Amino acid sequence: VIIKGPKGELQREVRPEIGVEIKEGKIFVLPKKETKRTKAFWGLIRSLLFNMVKGVTEGYEKKLQIEGLGFRASLQGDDLVLQVGFTHPVEIKAPEGIKFLVEKNIITISGIDKELVSQIAAKIRAVRPP
């Protein structure tokens, strides 16, 4: 399934036991067989497609706050550099489709893919857990 919007394009493979149809500008997700496993995938695929549509139209962003004496974040090109009490700065490369913004002690991660934005936020938080 490929979803295009004003902010970009996302694509995802859909499991063979789930059918996806587009009618009158709406996306319909239906199971091909009614099993317990298929019903679980049905809800999952519906949610993932909804997140993709929202991402290419509105985008996603997560904000992280840095707290700690001497803790700082800065941008080096497109990459994020964290100084969080280690003897060396920690550099986090921005994957394709992700943008970092640093204002004082707030790091903003934005992009169109909700999974990727959340994954990068978790990676940043894991550098120095609270």
Image (tube, rainbow, N blue to C red):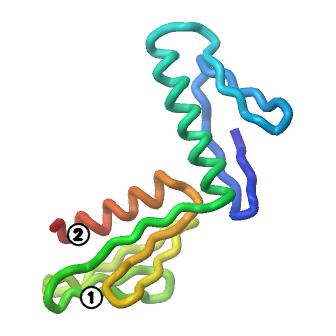
At a point 46% along the width and 81% down the height, the residue shown is: 101
Query: Could you say which quadrant of the image residue 48 lies in?
Result: top right
At a point 67% along the width and 22% down the height, the residue shown is: 19
At a point 47% along the width and 51% down the height, the residue shown is: 115
On screen, residue 122 versus residue 46, left or right, reads: left
Q: Label 2 neighbourhood size at 10 Å, few (<14), some (14-19), many (20+)?
A: few
Residue at the limit of the structure toward the right, as seen here:
24
Mark 1 in CB contact with mark 2 (< 8 angstroms): no
Expressed as whole percent of the image width and height from the top left, the position of residue 84 reads 19, 82
At a point 47% along the width and 57% down the height, the residue shown is: 116
Q: Quadrant of the N terminus?
A: top right
Q: Quadrant of the C terminus?
A: bottom left
Q: Label 1 neighbourhood size at 10 Å, few (<14), some (14-19), many (20+)?
A: some
- Asked if residue 41 is positioned above or below residue 59 in the image, the reply reads above
Q: Nearer the viewer, residue 22 or 76?
A: 22
Residue at the limit of the structure toward the top, as seen here:
34
Type of the residue with mark 2: Val
Expressed as whole percent of the image width and height from the top left, the position of residue 83 reads 24, 86
- Residue 127, disc: 2
Expressed as whole percent of the image width and height from the top left, the position of residue 81 reads 34, 83
Query: How many numbered discs?
Result: 2
Type of the residue with mark 1: Arg
- Residue 22, disc: none
Q: Secondary structure at mark 2?
A: helix
- Residue 72, disc: 1
Q: Earlier in the sequence, mark 1 or mark 2?
A: 1
Q: CA distance from mark 1 to mark 2?
A: 13 Å
On screen, residue 29 versus residue 21, left or right, reads: left
On screen, residue 49 versus residue 63, left or right, reads: right
Expressed as whole percent of the image width and height from the top left, the position of residue 34 reads 55, 8
